[in-house]
Amino acid sequence: MASLRMSPQEPAQQAARVIGVLLQKASQRGTRPVPQFGLLGIGHGYYGAFPIEIAAFGDAGVAWNQGESPTLFGGSRPGVASAGLAARINLFGFAVAQVDWVHPFDRPQRNWLWQFTLQPGF
């Protein structure tokens, strides 16, 4: 079985690992509301004025093109994987702000990273 890790000298190959027309993905997330931090109890309802959630997650996936196969199916295309922790706050339904502390397992030159996301609300 081929190794999922690549050397730091191959950044173009690392970037190419997430490009393809076919995709297989697996994701697991455990989320829990944090009612006692709902803006320190300000506001009505269980979650307060600003609902806050915390989560632990793990993601894995592989992308490939026609004529290729992922290592999972005996081919040569390796996958990528990461795991981490997240905190998410709903900003009045207008937007959702999220901060992640993530470890990409398949990027040996990287350790834990911070990621900030601001996305539209529902």
Image (tube, rainbow, N blue to C red):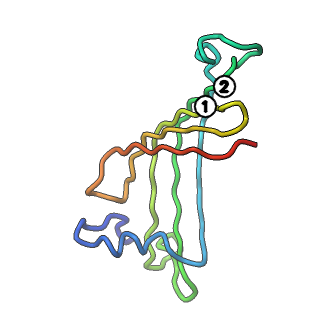
Q: Which residue is mark 2?
A: 51
The location of residue 34, given as percent across then percent down, is 61, 21
| Farthest-out residue, left | 9
Residue at 37% x, 59% y: name it.
106
Residue at 57% x, 44% y: name it.
118
Chain-order first, disc 1 or disc 2: 2
The location of residue 43, given as percent across then percent down, is 72, 14
Residue at 66% x, 25% y: name it.
51
When the figure is inspected, residue 57 is found, relative to residue 70, above or below; the finding is above
Quarter that holds the C terminus: top right
Quarter assignment of residue 10: bottom left
When the figure is inspected, residue 37 is found, relative to residue 85, above or below; the finding is above
31 vs 106, left or right, is: right
Q: In the rendered structure, are the residues bearing label 1 and label 2 in contact, judged by CB atoms less than 8 Å apart?
A: yes
The location of residue 41, given as percent across then percent down, is 65, 10
In the structure shown, which secondary structural element does the residue marked by tag 2 occupy?
Answer: loop
Q: Which residue is mark 1?
A: 89
Q: Residues within 10 Å of mark 2 (few under 14, many from 20)?
A: many
Q: Depth check: give the residue in front, 2 or 114.
A: 114
Residue flagged by tag 2: what amino acid is it? Pro
118 vs 83, left or right, is: right
Residue at 47% x, 40% y: name it.
100
Residue flagged by tag 1: what amino acid is it? Ile
When the figure is inspected, residue 41 is found, relative to residue 101, above or below; the finding is above
When the figure is inspected, residue 39 is found, relative to residue 4, above or below; the finding is above
Q: Depth check: give the residue in front, 102 or 62.
A: 102
| Farthest-out residue, bottom | 67
Q: Residues within 10 Å of mark 1 (few under 14, many from 20)?
A: many
114 vs 23, left or right, is: left
120 vs 4, left or right, is: right
- CA gap between label 1 and label 2 equals 6 Å
The location of residue 14, given as percent across then percent down, is 36, 69
